[in-house]
Structures are given as C-alpha cells and as structure tokens.
Amino acid sequence: MSKSEVSENRLTLPQVKKVLETIGEENLDQFQRRTFDYVSKFTKAEPEAAEELLQKLTKEYELDESEAVQIINCMPQTVDELRIFLAGGKKIIEAQKLNQIVELLNENRLLK
C-alpha cells in the first residue's frame, strides 16, 4: 500500500472560478456546477488580480493567508468592514495601512 501526500491550499473565489473554467462547464459534475454558479455570482475580482492581491496582502501587509483569502473573497469597501476580518488577529495594524489595503481592494474590484 503506497502512501500519498495530500496538501491543502487556500483558494480565493476568483481562483476557484478559474480552475473550474479550465475544466470546462460541460465536464463539471453536479457539485462542481453548483460551486461554479456560486463563484460566478460572488466573485468580486479577476483571478489574476486576486492572485496579486493575495501576494501583496501576505507579503507587504503581513496578513495571514487565511485572512487575506477572506478579505479577497468579500472585498470590504471601508476600513470598518476590513477590521471585521482582522479582529481575531493578535497584531495591530495602523489605520494608514488599513486605508492602503482598502484602496488596493478598490483598484482591483470588479464593477457589477
């Protein structure tokens, strides 16, 4: 019996949409179709922009990957909304950095 290594990656909604699009809508099973429908409705950034945002939020702003993924999934529009995602963290982030994050999100937000 061989052992296989399983890894887990956190993906943003835009990244999930991109993965499902590469499979092709006609090749998706029922669960994947529902997931594709959900991410199509609730994606708030382009996949490439989401990947860049994830890198910037984790590297430049030193956020945890899980926090960054949730921020990208919801794309808060104000600093107060952003603070909700950071409330559980042990580090304090300056108001200036929070404003910069909101501006960064606004630059990459899909207009619907």
Image (spheres, rainbow, N blue to C red):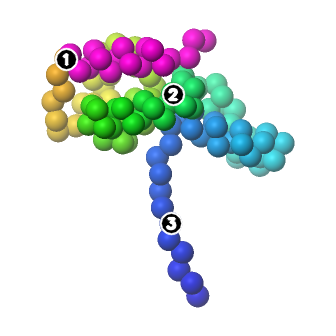
Residue 14: x, y in percent?
A: 57, 33
Q: If you read the primary sequence from the N terminus, does the residue marked by circle 3 or circle 1 appear first? A: 3
Which residue is identified by label 3? 6
| Mark 3 vs 1: CB contact within 8 A | no
Which residue is identified by label 1? 95
Answer with left or right where residue 33 lies relative to residue 50: right
Dot 3 amino acid type: Val
Residue 58: x, y in percent?
A: 33, 38
Which contiguous range is marked in magenta?
A: 96-112
Dot 2 amino acid type: Ala
On whether residue 110 falls in the magenta region, the answer is yes
Total labels drawn: 3
Residue 2 in the image: above or below residue 99: below
Closer-to-camera residue (4/34): 4
Which residue is identified by label 2? 49
Q: Is residue 70 visible?
A: no
